[in-house]
Image: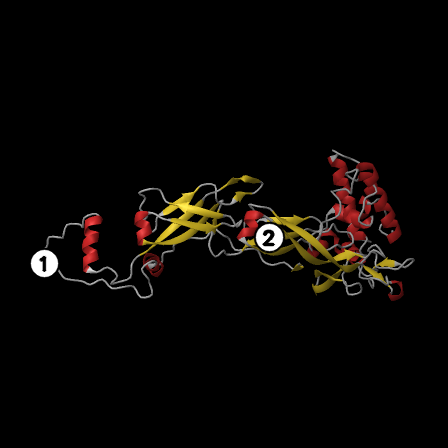
Amino acid sequence: MPKETEFYERLEITPDADQDTIKKSYRKMAIKYHPDKNPNNPAAAEKFKEVSEAYEVLSDPEKKEVYDKYGKEGLKEGGGMRDAADIFAQFFGGGSPFSSFFGGGGRGGPKKGDDIVHELAVTLEDLYKGKTTKLSVTRNKICPKCEGSGTKVGGVSASCKTCNGSGRRMVIRQLGPGMIQQMQTVCDDCGGKGETVKEEDKCKQCKGKKVEKEKKILHVHIDPGMRHGQKIVFANEADESPGLEAGDIIFVIVEKKHDVFMHKGNDLVMEMTIPLIEALTGFTATIKHLDDRVLLLKTEKGDVIKPGDARVIPNEGMPQHKRTQDRGNLYIQFNIEFPKPGFINEKAAKELEKILPARRPAPKVTEGQYETCELHKIPGADSAGGRKGAQQRSGGAAYESDEEEGPQRGGVQCQQQ
C-alpha cells in the first residue's frame, strides 16, 4: 500500500491502476480543466495544475516508486516539477486539442529556438549612404521528406520506454536508513531525445536526424544613419527544429575606423593641419565627403585660427536613422604647422615686429634674484603635434571614443558575397 494516495485521488484512480488507466484519466481531466476551456476560472486552473503534477509522477515508473515509498517528501530530493502546460503539450504531441476552437496553442504556441548573432563590419561610408549586402547563411532546416519525424513513410518512431519520452531518467541512491538521493540524468537509451527509431525505419534523406543543412542568401539592408551596435533582425531564419519555433538571425553593426572622420553621435569630427600663414591670414581648402562630394572651405575675413581651435559646417554630419533629411554637423579641429627652427632671420624678425601685435613687456628682475632656464624640445614631438604629444605623455587624450565594444560572435556561418 502506498504511503500516500493524494496523487491517485487527484486523477480519480486506485493505487493499482496501470499506465493506460493513468493516461486515460489524465487526458479526460486535463481537457476538462484546461485554462483554454475555462477562461477566468481560477479554481479550474488550480485543478489543472494538480492533475498535471499527479500525472507527471505516476506516469514515470521511477518517480512513482519513490512516491509510493516516501510520499511527496521523497520527491523533493529530485528537484522541482515541470510546468503544467509543458506536461499537457508533451502529452498531446506539442499541440493543443483546443487550437481549432480557441485560436492557438494554449500559451502562445511552441517554444522558440536559440537566436544566432553575427557581427557585421561596415564602413562609415556605408552608414552615411546606406548599402545592401548579401550574406550566405548555413542553417538547419526541417527535412522536407519526413517533415521532421525522422522516419520514412510508414516508419514508426516510438516513445522511449526507459524515460517515457522525457529524455531524462531519475537515478536513486540510498544514502542510509530512510535517506535517499535523486538525480536527473540524460537517458542512455534515447540520448535525451525521448524517442527511439529503428535503423530500417529512419528517413533516407536526413538519416533520422529530422533536419538537414540549408544554404540561404540573406539581403542585409544597412540604412543611412544606422550606428555602431545597432541590430538588423531576420525573424525565424535561425536553425529549425521539430516542435520549436525557429529563432532569429541577428546582425550587429560594427563600425570600422575611418582614416579621416570620427563618428560622434550624429556629428562628424575631423582634424586639419594648416600652415601658420593660413592660420593668420585665412585660407581656402577642399575636403572629400563620405558620399564623394567635394566641399570647398573658406575662412571668414579677418579670422585667426589658433592651435586647437575648431570650426563647424552645419548639416554636414551623419544623417539620422529613418529621418535622413535631418543631419548633424561636421566639426574641424585645427593643428597649426609652424616654421622650422632657423626659418626666420634677423631681418624677417624685425619685419614681423612691425606687423604682429607688440611683445609683452620684459619681466623686471633684479640681478641675483633669478635663475636662467632653457626650454628643450620634447623628444618625438614635432611643431604641429607638440601640444598633442605633451597631452599624451601626461596621460591626457585628444579624443575619447563613444563606441562600445561589440557583442561576442555567434555560431552562424556567414560569408560576404
The residue that label 1 is drawn on is 369
Asked if residue 380 shows in the view, the reply is yes
Mark 2 is on which residue type? Answer: Val
Q: Residue at x 70, y 57 (%)?
A: 78
| Disc assigned to residue 132 | none
Q: Residue 397: horizontal and vertical position, in percent?
A: 38, 55
**Quarter of the rendering occupied by the N terminus:** bottom right
Relative to 139, say whether 50 is above or below: above
Tag 2 secondary structure: strand
The residue that label 2 is drawn on is 252
Q: Nearer the viewer, residue 209 or 95?
A: 209
Mark 1 is on which residue type? Answer: Gln
Is 311 left, or right, of 81 in this rendering? left
Q: Residue 61: horizontal and vertical position, in percent?
A: 81, 57
Give the farthest residue toward the right. 154
Tag 1 secondary structure: loop
Is 40 left, or right, of 329 in this rendering? right
Give the farthest residue toward the top. 40
Residue 346, quarter of picture: bottom left
Q: Residue 253: horizontal and vertical position, in percent?
A: 58, 52
Give the farthest residue toward the left. 367
Label 1 – label 2 distance at C-alpha: 66 Å
**Quarter of the rendering occupied by the C terminus:** bottom right
Q: Residue at x 87, y 47 (%)?
A: 24
How packed is label 1: few (under 14 Cα within 10 Å), some, or many (20 or more)? Answer: few
Q: Nearer the viewer, residue 29 or 148?
A: 148
Q: Residue 195: horizontal and vertical position, in percent?
A: 82, 59
